[in-house]
Image (tube, rainbow, N blue to C red):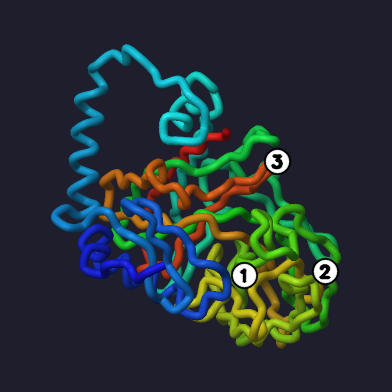
Amino acid sequence: MSNTHSDRLERWCGAEAVQRISTAMRGWYGPPIILSGVPGNVYAASDGDFVGVIEGGQFLSGLDWSLMRLGRIFRNASRRQLSRANAGFSSLSDIISEATSGGKQRLFQWEKEILTMSAPAGGTASHWQTNSYPTIAPTPSAAPGGDATTDASVGAPAMDNVSPDTRHVVSSWGTCSLLGKTFLLYDRLFQVSKTMNSAAAESVTGVPTRYQSTTPGDADYIGGNFGFVETGTTALAATAHTWTACTYKDQDGNASTLPDLVGNASSTARRLDHPVGQWYAPLASGDRGIKAWTNIQCSAQVATGLIHFVIGHPLCWMPIHTATLLAFHDHLNRPFGRPRVFDDAALAILDVLFSGTGNYNMNITVNTVAG
């Protein structure tokens, strides 16, 4: 793929959003991640650059387009729908048919009122345990077992299985009361709680049930599975600590060791316990994804707090153009840019590189179609 026209991309998304995603992707070990809301097929790559073709941004920004779209919605709201397309799934009309007459459209929604979320600028926050819909997730099961999370897990939106069909994201839309938000939609594959008041090694035996293929090119290839350390609903004590000697199985199923990851003394609730600017745990050189955690360990005894070790798989970036205004993210006209959502997926959202402390409200809807 060729590099994306940078001026058009900044005009469409806003320079701040482009810079935030670029910074977040530097050093990323997985495949490029699609940008929602950008016309064409644009992906964020591991060097912080963007690849693919943008089919907008010559004259209008994403904000301008959103305003035009809102106007169209208000006009059409008063008109009666007189007809519907009827076709298969090999073209745009096929998708429309599956979504309408086929009854294979599903909407997944997040309505979050974040009243206690705080993180320094450049930190990353998790919405897995925030108010109010989907329901706040409970503390994960402790090591060694942990939880292979699915749509049946509390905290994830419920979904129906569609196999042998496949489900894909075709659009999304969202609002946020604060400007400068870049959300990442991901499939939460596995979680396990770590005993904080201990510096002893704890083995992990539980494994995910999705994205477990060791064959590159498979839809469920392990490459791109990322790990992160998530503070639960209780903040950590003011103790300096490092996540050290943690081990995992890589994309080939081989044993590997995570480079030391420096945590945060007094890490706030629902924040990733990572250094600023880092939303994923870096892997050993040459590794491309995590199949499973095998050992977790902290360098110090942290008297209080909750920590979860998580494995996720990214689906798409969802930048919000401006505060309180609905942002539309369209994947319909992207032949290669409709992220797949597997049966039983535990869909979840990260607020990546948090732009500063403050309470906010967030409402996001993801529209999927199976075919």
Task: Say whether residue 254 is left or right of residue 264.
Answer: right
| Dot 1: element | strand
Q: Which of marks 3 and 2 is nearer the N terminus?
A: 3
Residue that label 3 marks: 152
Seen from the viewer's position, the closer of residues 318 and 339 is: 339
**Amino acid at the residue labelled 2:** Val
Q: Residues within 10 Å of mark 1 (few under 14, many from 20)?
A: many
Question: Please, what secondary structure does the residue beneath circle 3 have?
Answer: loop
| In the image, residue 168 above or below residue 126 | above
- Image position, residue 337 (x, y; %): 46, 52
Residue bearing the label numbered 1: 228
Q: Are marks 3 and 2 in contact (CB under 8 Å)?
A: no
Instruction: Residue type at mark 3: give it.
Output: Ala
Could you say which disc has been placed on residue 276 in the image?
none
User: How many residues crowd around disc 2 within 10 Å: few (fewer than 14), some, or many (20 or more)?
Assistant: many
Amino acid type at image mark 1 = Phe
Where is residue 118, by image quadrant? Answer: bottom left
Residue 296 in the image, given as x and y percentages of width and height: 76, 76
Q: Which residue is drawn at 42% across and 29% down?
A: 93
- Name of the residue lying farthest toward the left: 59
Q: Name the residue under label 2.
A: 204
Q: Nearer the viewer, residue 232 or 345?
A: 345
- Looking at the image, which is closer to me, 189 or 130? 189
Q: How far apart are marks 3 and 1 (CA)?
A: 22 Å
* Label 2 – label 1 distance at C-alpha: 15 Å
Q: In this view, does 161 lie above or below 212?
A: above
Q: Do the residues labelled 2 and 1 touch (CB within 8 Å)?
A: no
User: Going from the N terminus, do you reach mark 3 or mark 1 first?
Assistant: 3
The earlier-in-sequence mark between 2 and 1 is 2
